[in-house]
Amino acid sequence: MLFLSLLLDAIARPRPTRLRHWRGMLLHGLMMTALFGVLLAGSGNVVVSAVVGVALVGLFVVASNAKNRMLGEPIVFSDLALLAGIVRHPRFYFTAITLGQRWMLGIGAGGAVIALALLFSGQAQPHLIGAAVALAAGGVLALLLRGLAYDGVATRPDLAGDFARYGMLATLLLYWWRWRGSTDPAGCAPIEIRPNPTGAPLPELIVVVQCESFCDPLDITDDPANALPGLAAARAAAWQWGTLDVSGFGAYTMRTEYGVLFGRAESALGFRRYDPFLTAAGEASYALSARLKLAGYRSLFVHPHDLRFYNRDRLMPAVGFDAMIGEDALAPRAGPGTGGRYVDDRALGGSLIDLIDRNGGPTLLYTVTMENHGPWDSDTARDAAGRREAYLRHLRNSDAMLRDLTDHLARSGRPALLVFFGDHRPSIPGVTAPGGARHTPYVMLRFDSAGAILPGAADPVDLSPAALHHRILDCLAPQRESARVTPTAV
């Protein structure tokens, strides 16, 4: 079992250029021994426990390699928190593996269940031995991690390097252990709202649109015919615009979302960076919604999908959002199939316009769209060209939403700020791939009470998601916020 599991671990990407470090192999052996003990305690059958243990390692290797191929990143401990989402929305995840692999996984899982049922032992002794083995191996693991032997091992995030150096299982354990030992930062001071020295009015209305899988089509097609007129017009009129240096590719919406909402750079997060939403409740004072609440703003979170994703249903109220608006309230506004399986962006824009008109006074509307989320199905999406055309069609809906919001805010008669950005690029087989550029566009437009768009810098400014957070606050507390984060800080 140990030998086969090490062979499987060796084919997990990124692969090692030489033998794994002995510290990684030691952790691997102890983890497999503990897993064997747990399985033996449950089944009472030595052979079944060993086979299932190896099969589970194989399952993790398949999942990790599929993720690395699609997203440019191997499996990490925080991915285990997404298991509930896999059950609720399997198409989000199973499209990353081939049909043959899905059949293999299904057959393997069914065979494992049947084998466990048929070969279960009713004798007490093997169950007790399994429990003893699990406790002993787990105890040794705990002592090693708490002792000096691993003090200097994987103390800074270097996922690809540590994965190749120590192996898949050891890296999962080490990164979880470092994450578990992280602490919440000190509370964030309230912002001091004051007039802008340039004379620009303070925005009464702040509309932030986090557009799913949105990128400039010219960055992935090099075809001027695919240019988005709404994005081009917004850039020409923007108070500030440029590229957003997001860390993820093809997924991990919450990393960009966290950066914009909380304003903490990934370099400050340590091992929390892989899924910052898991610990975000302990950092509530940093949230845009919490800081604006103290300044008298009412905050609404809008997302036309299952709000349980990333535990948004619990997290967003905890960090200061006064109302949550999900798919039940927004789905009826969807157009006739234009958004595919999700609420289309232009219909979502219509719902946002309704919310803008119904909510007077200082208001923050933070919206996470869904239309551009894969898989990109259409009648012609049987190959890369079909998927590409389906994606570009969805982008045009997003661009129309941006135009509609810009036009409405110009007519609304309220000082406003519109922020529109892509959370990451899409991972479309045959069209886009990890390893190259990852940036997405962002635009910030400011409106005065007469509907005029306030001029800004003509040249683009590249920002991280965290820096974009501080540029939003800079519209309320000039100079102080922008001085806290350098534009390209990640």
Image (spheres, helix red, strand yellow):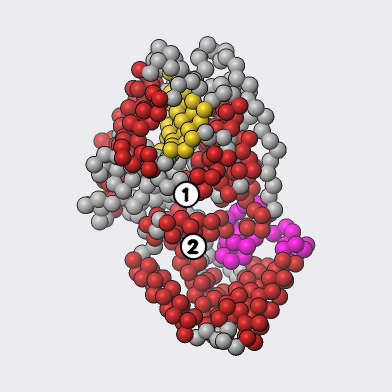
Amino acid tagged 2: Ser
| Badge number at residue 224 | none
For the residue pair 125 and 102, the one nearer the viewer reads as: 125
Work out whether mark 2 precedes mark 1 in sequence or the reverse, and give the earlier one: 2
In this rendered view, identify the residue nearer to me: 454 or 84: 84
The quadrant of the rendering that contains the N terminus is: bottom right
**Location of residue 470 in the rendering, given as x and y in whole percent from the top left corner:** 57, 29
Q: Dot 1: few (<14), some (14–19), or many (≥20) neighbours within 10 Å?
A: some
Q: Nearer the viewer, mark 2 or mark 1?
A: 1
Residue ID at (39%, 75%): 107
Per the image, the residue denoted by label 2 is 64
Q: Is residue 164 magenta?
A: yes
Spot the residue most to the left: 379
Identify the residue shown where x is 35% and y is 22%: 408
Q: Quadrant of residue 295?
A: top right
Proximity of marks 2 and 1: CB atoms separated by less than 8 Å: no
| Residue 201: in magenta span | no
Residue under label 1? 309
Give residue 412's position: percent from left, percent from top. Answer: 38, 18
* Residue 392 visible from this viewpoint: no
Q: Which stretch did the figure color magenta?
A: 145-174
Tell me: residue 186, above or below residue 20.
above
Q: Helix, strand or loop at disc 1?
A: helix
* Residue 208 visible in this rendered orientation of the protein: yes
The residue shown at (46%, 30%) is 365
- Residue 403: percent from left, percent from top: 33, 27
- Residue at 36%, 39% (x, y): give it: 330
Amino acid type indicated by mark 1: Phe
**Mark 2 and mark 1: Cα distance apart in space:** 21 Å
